[in-house]
Structures are given as C-alpha cells and as structure tokens.
Amino acid sequence: MHKPGDVVLGGLFEVHYTSVFTERTFTSEPQQPSCTGFDTLGFRDTMTMAFAIDEINNNSNLLPNVTLGYSLYDNCGALVIGFSGALSLASGREEQFLLQQNCLGTPPVLGIVGDSYSTFSIATSNVLGLYKMPIVSYFATCSCLSDRQRFPSFFRTIPSDAFQVRAVIQILKYFGWNWVGLLVTDDDYGHHVAQSFKSDLAQSGVGCLAYLEVLPWDSDPNEIKRIVHLIKTSTARVVMVFAHEIHTIHLMEEVMRQNVTGQQWIASEAWATAAVLQTPHLMPYLSGTLGIAIRQGEIPGLREFLLRIHPDQNGNEDYGSDMVRQFWESTFQCRFAPPPAGWVEAGGALCTGQEDLENVETEFLDLSNLRPEYNVYKAVYALAHALDDMLQCEPGRGPFDGHSCATLQRLEPWQLAHYLQKVNFTTSIGDQVSFDENGDALPIYDIMNWLWLPDGRSKVQNVGVVKRSAFKVEELTIDGDKIFWNFGLNKPPRSVCSESCPPGTRMATKKGEPVCCFDCIPCSEGKISNMTDSTECTTCPEDFWSSHQRDQCVPKKTEFLSYHEPLGICLTTASLLGTFISVVVLGIYTYNHNTPMVRANNSELSFLLLGSLKLCFLCSLLFIGRPRLWTCQLRHAAFGISFVLCVSCILVKTMVVLAVFKASKPGGGASLKWFGAMQQRGTVIVLVSIQAAICTAWLVSSSPAPHKNTQYHNDKIVYECVVGSTIGFAVLLGYIGLLAILSFLLAFLARNLPDNFNEAKLITFSMLIFCVVWVAFVPAYVNSPGKYADAVEVFAILASSFGLLVALFGPKCYIILLRPEMNTKKAIMGRGTTKS
C-alpha cells in the first residue's frame, strides 16, 4: 500500500501469516511467493498507520506545510519476505513506488515502522542500521535489540523482553510460585527470553525452572506431543509460554488432545489477548490464564476511518485495492468475480462490494482492546515529532557539522535518528512517549486474566499493571479479588518443588537438583530458625537455649542446690535438726552444769564443742541456695573455722585425758601445769587462728566466686562456686584432717586407760566416724557435677557433725536424763576404785 508525500514513512506488517514458496531450478526465473491466511488484526495494524499519517497531515500544529506519505509492506510471516520488503523500502527498487517530480534527493523512505517479529527486526536492523535508518518497532521485544553498538538506529514503543521477564518474575513472587515451567519459540525472541529468564530468576532467588522447552518453529507434532506430555507429568503447576500465536495454537490443541488440566498458564504479550485462542474447546484449559499484555490505549477517530475502507472495483482505492479486497472476502466470507472454480456450486457467495461493515460481527471493528495498534500509533507520531523538531532547527544552531541543520530537500535518515533519540511528547490520552539511551520506551504492561463466562463466552479482563518507575524500580499492582482461577475454591494453585520449611528447620538442597528442591532439616540443639524457609540455623546467645520446637531462644534452665527442691529441703531439715539437737544438748548441759557428769568431762570445752557443732550444722546452709559472692566466700571459711574449732576442742580434751592419766602416776603431777584452763583456751585459739590465717590468705589471693557452668548440660546453667585456689581448699581440708588424725591417734592410745568413764573411747569412735566421712567425701566431691558436689559437701558436714554429736554427747545425755543414779560423784569414783 502506497501513498505519496513530501516525506515517506515505511511500514512492515503481518497481513498474511503464511507464505508458500514454489520450487525453482537454476534455469527458472524467481517467482514471488504466495501469501495465504489473511490476518485481520495485522491488517488493522496496517490501517492504523495509515490513519495516524492522515491525522498528522490534517494537524496544523504538527509538520505544517509538510505532507507525509507511506509505503506499507506485508511480511507474510516469513523472514525472507519481510527482509526483502525492508530493503525495497530503503532502496526504492519497487515498481509500485512513485517518485514525485519535486523530489530533489530525499531518500525514498526516511524511517520505518516495524517489524512485528524480533527475528525480522534483527535482520532488518543489522543491514539498515549501517545507514542509521531509523526503525521503530511496535511488537519486537527481544532484549538483544537494546544493544546500541549493534543496532544504533533501532527504537521501539513496546517494552523489551528484559522488562517482560522481570514483570513475570514479579508475578511469580507475588503468588509464591517458585517451581515453574518455561516454553519458548525457536527463534531470537524465544532464545533471549530463555537466557534472560534463567539469569534473572537465579539472581532474584524467587524460584527455579522445572523444565525449559523450545517449541519447534515448524510445529513438529511429535515434538509438541513430547513437550505436552512433559507438562502433564511435571510437578510444576505453572507454565509460562513465550511464543507467537501460531505456535501457541498448535501447543494448546495438543494440550486439549491429551486433556492436560490443572495448569496455570502464564501468557507472554505475544498471545495474552489473542482472540483466536479463546474458543469454546480451548477455554476449559485456558480459563484463568494470566498474561502480560501491551499497554492498552485509545485512538479517537480510528473507527470512523476504518469504516471508510471499501473495495474499489475500478482499482483506484488509496489503500491498496488487492489487499482491501482480500480483507473484504475474509470478513464477509465471499469472493469477488471471477470466483475460484466450484465456489458458487459449493454454496459460496459472491461479493458485491455493497456489504456493510457495521452489520457484520468482526474483531476488525472491536476497538475496545487496542494494544499493538496503540504502539503503531505512537511509533508514527514519534517519527513525526522527530521530523518536526528537525525541521524547526534554526540555521547556525543545529546539531550537525558546523552547527548546520537538516533541510527538507536534503534529509538523511541518520539525521532523523538523531532527533528521534531525543523525542518526548504526550499522546492524546496522556501517555508519555520517549526513548532511553537504548531506544526503549518507558516500560509498562497490563496484567490480563482470562474468564470463561457461564453463557459460554470468554472475556479478558485487566487485573493489574506492572511498570518501571522513574527510579527504575519495577512496581506491581494486582487486584487479587478480580482474578478468576480455574481451580477448586477459586484460589491460586500452589507450585513448589518442596513445601516451605517451617520455623525450627533449615533448607538443605537435594544433591543434583535445583535449589528450590530441598529437604527440611531440624535445627540442632542450641540453634534456631524463626523464619519460614530459613537457609541456616542461628546459634542462641550464651545464656539461652533452643526451645523444643527450635523456633526461638529461651533462657536456659538454672540449676543449683535450692531450698525448694526435695534434696535441698532434706538437707536443710537435717541441718536445722542438728542445730536444734545441739541447742537441746547445750540446754541440758547448762541446766545440769553442776552435776558430776558435766563437771567431770571438762565442761568448758564441752560447751565450746557444742557451740562449734551448732556452727557446723548452720554453715551447711550456706551451701544451699543460689551462689552469691558473699556466700561463696563465707561458706568455706565458716566450714573450715567451725570444724577446726570443733576438732581443736576434741584434741585438747584428748590431751587433757592423757595428761590426767600421766599425772595420776608417781612424779607425774608436773605435767598438769601445761594443761590448765588458760592453756586449754590458748591452744584452741592458736589452732583456730591458724585456720583463720589459711582462710584469709585463700580469700585474698584467689577468692572463691560464683560461676555459671555450661559444661555439664548444654541446655542448663549450673550455678556453682569455684574454689578459686585449689591449693587453698586443699590446705584448708588438710589442716582439718591433720587435727582429726592427731585427735584420733591420741584418743586411740588413751582408749583403755583405767577410768570409770573414760571419754577417750567416745572420742576415738567419733574421730573414726569423722575421718571415714571425709575420706569418702573427697572422691565423691570430685566426681559429682554441679549441685550434687554441694550436696555431697553438705552431707559430709552433716554426717560428721551428727557423728560427733551422737558419739560424744549421746551416752552422757542418756545418763543425765535416763540414769540419774549414775550421775553422782560416788558412782563415778566408786566404779573407778573397783576397777583399779
């Protein structure tokens, strides 16, 4: 289709979608291929460019005094035809091209709108880009076309696949689909989509590809059957299809034959609004489809322009008589005379040319969903605005050599390309049109959803939009309540390779499989994960431990010898009982202090011994309860001094017994002067002072201190007192042991001394108990963990204290309370005389 003008713009459209090439030999003349399969929407794209140019010519504010013409070619869905048309546009070697008499050298075509396929645009731009011929595509989306080094004069009014891929990834992320299949066509468009998708999907971490299949360009039935079987058996419920309409049709027909249901289809812009797929036999499988669609626009006045299209029997029609006739025949299902042989006999109607377009149901006049047409419209206006800016250049202030400007008589395509890069205008409906440094328009897509209505009709509705903001960030807006899902309960499907790992577990990738396929491994003790799909477990702080579900850190349980637990209660009771008994015995002794039994056994040391035993019982309470600094420091000092006081009293009593026996012999009276009351008190004080000095040195040099021990149990904090200096603790115990052994030896030697009531026997027995208890204490203490070490020490204190109390004072209290007749001086002295 051609129309003359001062400046001519070219166009490449798919008016026919099939071409047939006749075989030829080397001797035969080349013949033109025949184009079949009239594409009504492709023809509407063509007429949209014609309308835009007519509208510009009637606009006095844009390109005044300049008439635009056009030369439009059909690519017939074949690369060789589209490429041939592009070369014809650039070179003017087409017989139908009419040069005007006033042409002074302007190229036949200054810019081209097209082509529709990415592969066709790549081939055309590879050649025409050498001459900086501006090409503005309305449908080629391959991201490779953004390469300015390779395609210096290529522009487009449709977003590139790079943005489309990111838009689809945003949708996958929105619905939580991380296990998806991808189908692409076997051309540049499909291969670049596959490459971008694998790269962007891995980088975003949104999901993984369950499979990636290439749809054959020739729609090989066996290959299509294999691919559909793979879709049917795959665990991925979401299938993305980046393919052209014709390849999608063949795919979906096989989907119907194999009855593949339960799939969520994601449509690329190439077929997101294709009416040819919205048929009653395909909609049971395709209803609920989500698609990325070209931005919808409005073109006022286009309907009236299209209604003026009419076949001219005389061949004078501006819009191409042959092409309009084909459109007419396709729309009204008739044939112009002479019809094909047998047409009339088969019931076919003849076209009269008087048919009314408004009275026939055709998608040609359905302008409610203008998408590629709107991109064509913007492409034509972009070239017009660039030309207008170029012609408004002031001489001497131009952008070319010597600040020169381009003139209408000497226009060059590369000059128009320069201005096209800087074009910036707003359409009649308010959309801004400009190009970035790569020739790409500001990207924006509508998100479409396919509905299958109860009455059998299909509908494609807009449910959202995805666009790039001024800050180059993808913004996704979806109205989820409007979306129709072709699944039970009208809810989106789940499409994951592995179910999400709940809190308390971490993801472990399966060997040899994508990262989206994983096992959920429970966190080990002491580690948690409090998020879904956590890749690792975090270690809890020192004083915290993992909960049973491993989803949070909880404070560790504390363990120490407590007053509230049975063991602590028993030991406390025993300590208080021992203290009470000591007080009772002390009261008995006090009440009977003048009796022979009390007086005969060194009453002062007995009272001191009972006091020290009471302190021994009470000091055990310092080992119960949560360790503090003062209790840690006091417990061992009190224990050490109390027991030294106790053992010192026993030692002095033993020495006094020996001294009295020795004094009873002739000439032995002098020895008693060393064991008078003052000497006894002094000896006790000296022995206790030595222990006090040991305790002081220990506390000053390396004091015991509370310690949180986590070595015994990982999930518990055992509060204990560390002794600080092991040497100090050993010296303290060794000193007590030394005095105890010395007392035992002296008492053992004096056990058979003649006396009516020889206390040496009781001391021997009490010291034997004391030594046995503390000899057993050492290994038990060393091998007892945590609070049990304290319990062992308390038990040793109580056992030795009770042993001393019962062994030393039990028989005496028995006589005092139950055998008072034996508590007389005569009884004691008499028995002693009889024995001697």
Image (cartoon, rainbow, N blue to C red):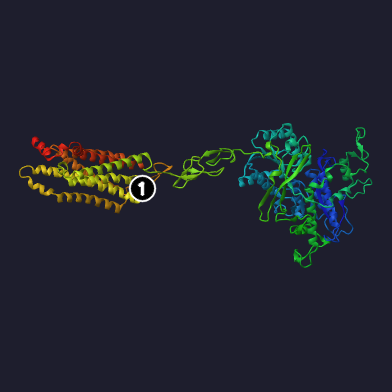
Check the image and report above or below for 251 versus 67: above
Q: Is residue 41 left or right of residue 584?
A: right
Left or right of 102 on screen, residue 663? left
* Nearer the observer, 635 or 397: 635
Residue at image location 62% in from the left, 44% down from the top: 206
Residue 247 in view here: no
Measured as percent of width and height from the top left, residue 632 is found at 33, 49
Taking the view exactly as shown, the residue that stands out farthest to the right is 314
Which residue is more in the foreground, 179 or 91?
Answer: 179
Q: Which of 58 and 609 is in front in this view?
A: 609
Kind of residue at disc 1? Pro
- Residue projecting furthest to the top: 258
Q: Residue furthest toward the left?
A: 666
Question: Does residue 354 appear left or right of residue 501 in this picture?
Answer: right
Could you say which quadrant of the image residue 518 lies in? top right
The spot of residue 296 in percent (x, y) is 76, 49
Q: For mark 1, does the 10 Å Cα neighbourhood hold few (<14), some (14 to 19), or many (20 or more) residues?
A: many
Quadrant for residue 357, please give it. top right
Residue 39 sits in quarter:
top right
- Answer left or right for 617 relative to 711: left
**Would you say residue 259 is visible in this rendering?**
yes
Could you tell me which secondary element the residue under label 1 belongs to? loop
User: Which quadrant, please, contains the C terminus?
Assistant: top left
Which x, y percent locates residue 521?
A: 52, 38
Circle 1 residue? 627
Residue at the extreme bottom = 396
x and y percentages locating residue 362 in the rendered image: 84, 42
